[in-house]
Amino acid sequence: MGVDTSERFITRAEELKEYFQRVAKPASERMIGLECEGVGVFEDTGKAIPYHGDRGVLAILTEMSQKFGWQPIREGEFIIALQKAQARITLEPGGQIELSSAPHPSLHALAEEFKDYWRQIKSISEPMGISFLGIGMQPVSRVEEIGWVPKGRYRIMSRYLKKKGSLSHYMMKLTATVQAAVDFADERDALNKLKLAFGLSPLVTAMFANSPLYEAKPNGFTTMRYYIWHYTDSDRCGQIQEIFSAPDPGFQTYIDYVLQVPMLFIQRHQEWIEMDGIPFGEYLKAGYKGYRATFEDWELHLSTIFTDARLKTYVELRSADHPRPDLALSVPALWKGVLYDDSARAAAWELIKDWSWEERVKSGWDVCYQGLRAKVRHQLFLDLARELIQISLEGLKRQRVFNESEQDERVYLYPLQDFISRYKASPGEVLLERWNGDWNQDLQKLIEYSRY
């Protein structure tokens, strides 16, 4: 039995709703953020870089801290993250290096941080013969060949999720995404954004689908990354049906879902404590092995909800594969144009509001194989994608946020519009066509095409 000496105990269930209410922001203070998971590979083989060694993740993080002023965060003797002001560099379980940007008032400011981050990473990794790819999944190494990042959190996750989903280790070690984060003004605004994000998730997944290779061979998918999520843990992945079925969904709708999700762990005094799958609601009522629920536990539990969108101190949009680098900033641009403009949000909802729950679920499977060739009610996702891009462009235009060159934020969405207009296909379909065509399955051409 543990003896819990933590502070900030949750004493009333209502405090969970107050937790979200406290972080709401007026429109004048809203920000945009990005998370970007980079797949590091050896340039000569395309294989995943390890954590340890002179040419590995730890060496890169060490140099980043020494040369660019990032503060190392350690677990035991190992660096497992870096921090500078409000930005963080963290690690996914297979060594994917992730930038969690600071929140920014504009896409222009976000783009500056994004570009500076990749300038720093490349200055260290390129002399090591390492490239980072804009791709949704490690394309060469088998899952068994990739080691684990030495984090206690991941040791527990690997054991637990292996029992829940046959492809859970593929998710942890192989996949990569670009995510956006947006603020909410109040309860209704938060749930409207969350509901629309879920509704658009299959379409956005198709627009950025970019993981058609595994073991240097076609894997049968346009986005194997999204397919893998279907076989990770049904308790905490996919979509939340109650967000659509509730007549007036609110914070409590989301909280009720989260309370029934089994817990993975808590942390006390830098020690990771396995929770054996007890639902958070049960833990909140009765505790567990002498531990009582704290707000730190709640925040940690929220980070283990892996649905297509999720609510934290912001709304996180999680649908996209990591696309090729020139399309990466189109992910936050697409979401900002839609979610930060009332007219755009209403127009986007019109595209998908009549879909049944069964159609939403089926489309989530279809896009794995078909990308923008998927259909709902004879509506081709390619056509819906064009409409959604136009809606977002108009939303960004109305927001009137300019850079020093008097360009508004549409400049970050134009690359996606141009790509889809030119190729009429998902990025993964274009990559696969080239892989089987003029690249002649040459790994060097794949790396050159996808690298930062």
Image (tube, rainbow, N blue to C red):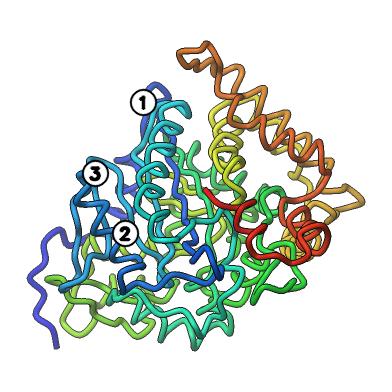
- Where does label 3 land, which residue? 68
Q: Amino acid at mark 3?
A: Phe
Q: CA distance from mark 3 to mark 2?
A: 11 Å
The reply to whether dot 3 and dot 2 touch (C-beta < 8 Å) is no
Q: Secondary structure at mark 3?
A: helix
Residue 360 point in image, percent of width and height: 73, 58
The 10 Å Cα crowd at callout 1, few under 14, some 14 to 19, many 20 or more, is: few
Q: Which residue occupies 56% across, 70% down?
A: 45
Q: Which residue occupies 19% across, 56% down?
A: 72
Indicate left or right for 96 with 18 as reference: right
Which mark sits nearer the N-terminus, 1 or 2? Answer: 1
The 10 Å Cα crowd at callout 3, few under 14, some 14 to 19, many 20 or more, is: few
Q: CA distance from mark 1 to mark 3?
A: 29 Å
Nearer to the camera, 307 or 254: 307
78 above or below 190? below
Nearer to the camera, 68 or 387: 68
- Where does label 1 land, which residue? 29
111 above or below 278? above
Residue 211 point in image, percent of width and height: 66, 63
Which mark sits nearer the N-terminus, 1 or 3? Answer: 1
156 above or below 223? below
- Where does label 2 land, which residue? 60
Q: Which residue occupies 83% across, 60% down?
A: 437
Residue 118 point in image, percent of width and height: 42, 44
